[in-house]
Image (cartoon, helix red, strand yellow):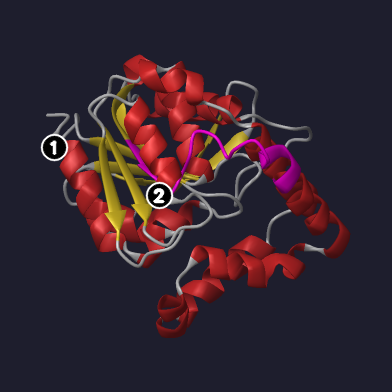
Amino acid sequence: MQGSDQQARTRDGTRLAYTFYDHPAPSRRIVLVHSLAMDRSFWRPVAERLAANAAVLIHDCRHHGGSEKPPGPVTVERHAGDLADLMDQLGWPTALVAGASMGGCIALAFAIGYPGRVAALGLVDTTAWYGPDAPKSWEQRANAAVASGLSSLTDFQVTRWFGDQFRTEHPQVVKECVDTFLRNDVAVYAQTCRMLGACDLRAGLSSIKAPTAIVVGEDDYATPPAMAQAMHNAIAGSSLTVLPGARHLTPLERPDEVAAELAKLLARTN
């Protein structure tokens, strides 16, 4: 199914690029938020699988892809506010909101900040907190990008993103992710790394009442299963699915299974 590429503006005037897959059932709505240094094409394989049963929105977060890159740092809460603005312009009071990695942090911030707008919550390959060493480790990654360029990080990234077998069997997917990664503005990428290093949403987890599905790759060492388990323990009634043999970008590595988990979550909203 082909989506429609469009643009909208947030409350502070920032232009966001998005793709919209329309559906006649007005109550079946899904928002999918991409990971760090990717763009909305990250979710396209899953969106196309879900679009037969729901309206689906995928967008480029500010500072990413075709969206504007205003100067200055940003927080996950600011990204959540952008999503609220985008949903307002579409006339969506509520939706199933799901995100992967950075997008999962944004989805969490949205669920905490806008609880009445979340029909269900999907947390894929993500965490509420990267741990006590996060500010230091993310700062090191930011500094490496600034000092040596994004290309210096590609080997590190691809082995975190995908398992060995997937990289061998799907070189085009890997190439497209690398190409997207290298199109990022280095200074903006560094700011976003620092944003994730500072992110700590643990205090809000117990407030989440929406049906929640947590999905993680068994071999994800960027946001490992232990981090998924911690969210599962803190969010009452949540489900936890560990995908055997998968690494960090499961929406690309295992789109059928991720789409199936989100379809089951959507069914819980009806």
Say which element carries label 1.
Answer: helix
Q: Does residue 7 sit above or below 142 in this rendering?
A: above
**Residue 24 visible to an observer of this rendering:** no
At x 51% / y 27%, what residue is drawn?
80
The residue labelled by disc 2 is 225
Q: Is residue 165 left or right of residue 158?
A: left
- Disc 2 is placed on an element classified as helix
Which of the two discs, 1 and 2, sits closer to the camera?
Answer: 2
Is residue 129 inside the magenta stretch?
Answer: yes
Across and down, in percent, residue 160 comes to 55, 64
x, y percent for residue 37: 61, 53
> 66 left or right of 192?
left
- Point out the stretch of residues depicted in magenta: 122-137
Q: Is residue 183 magenta?
A: no
Q: Quadrant of residue 11?
A: top right
Q: Which residue is mark 1?
A: 267
Q: What is the quadrant of residue 134 in the picture?
A: top right
The image quadrant of residue 230 is top left
Mark toward the start of the polypeptide (1 vs 2): 2
Total number of numbered discs in the rendering: 2
Q: Are marks 1 and 2 in contact (CB under 8 Å)?
A: no
Residue drawn at point x = 22 percent, y = 48 percent? 261
Q: Amino acid at mark 2?
A: Pro
